[in-house]
Amino acid sequence: MGLRVAAALIVLTALAPNVHGYCFKKAGARYGISPLLLKAISDVESNGDIHAVNYNAASGTVDIGHMQINSFWKKHLGAHYATLFDACYCTMVGAWILKQCIARYGYDWDAVACYHTGCGVADAKSRAKRKRGLAYIRKVKKRLAAAKQP
């Protein structure tokens, strides 16, 4: 019996990356966003760790899941906020947030900066926020370029 459970866990672990890829494709199709861009954001945010939790001492907020959804969004998500450790749900929420940034800045790098900092680089009120946005864009571009390599 124990051997069967171990074998099942090995199979499920091997399948997990494919399920995760499916999540990016599904969210990308729903919101008109490249699945590769969503994956690159996930990689930068948490290295794809679906159990990632980061506490932001300065702001008193928490980032949850592989897309690092900030607790700011809790009021919009309601009870579903607790579901952010589900890979597909977290991907869908991340794509929804990015889509709001795209509506504001267009489908360009300012929208990617907005996902991370809450505003585009041009709208950043402080030099520090502008630098954070630019650094984030560079990281996502690097991950995106690596994902496109054969």
Image (cartoon, grey):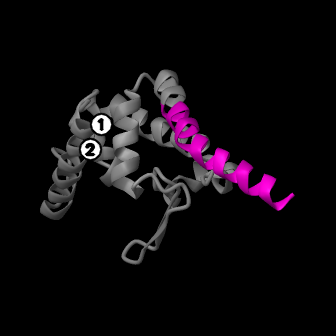
- The answer to if 53 sits in the magenta stretch is no
Residue 97, given in percent of the width and then of the height, sits at: 45, 40
Residue nearest the observer in this picture, 66 or 11:
11
- Per the picture, the main secondary structure of the magenta-coloured stretch is helix
User: Mark 1 is on which residue type?
Assistant: Ala
Determine whether the residue tagged by mark 1 lies in a helix, strand or loop. Answer: helix
Determine the image quadrant of residue 117.
Answer: bottom left
Q: Looking at the rendering, in which quadrant would you find the N terminus?
A: bottom right
Mark-to-mark CA distance, 2 and 1: 6 Å
Q: What mark, if any, has residue 147 been given in the picture?
A: 1
Q: Amino acid at mark 2?
A: Arg
In this image, 27 relative to 44: left or right?
right
Residue count near mark 1 (Cα–Cα under 10 Å), binned few <14, some 14–19, many ≥20 = few
The quadrant holding residue 20 is: top right
Q: Provide residue 86's location: percent of width, then percent of height.
A: 63, 48
Tell me what residue is drawn at x 48 percent, y 53 percent.
66
Residue 8 among those drawn in magenta: yes
**Residue 60, placed above or below residue 122:** below
Image location (x, y in percent) of residue 27 = 51, 30
Label placed on residue 38: none
Left/right placement of residue 91 relative to residue 4 reads left
Front residue (pair 58, 36):
36
Q: Which residues are magenta?
A: 1-24
- The residue lying toward the viewer, choosing from 16 and 109, is 16
In the image, which disc is placed on residue 143? 2
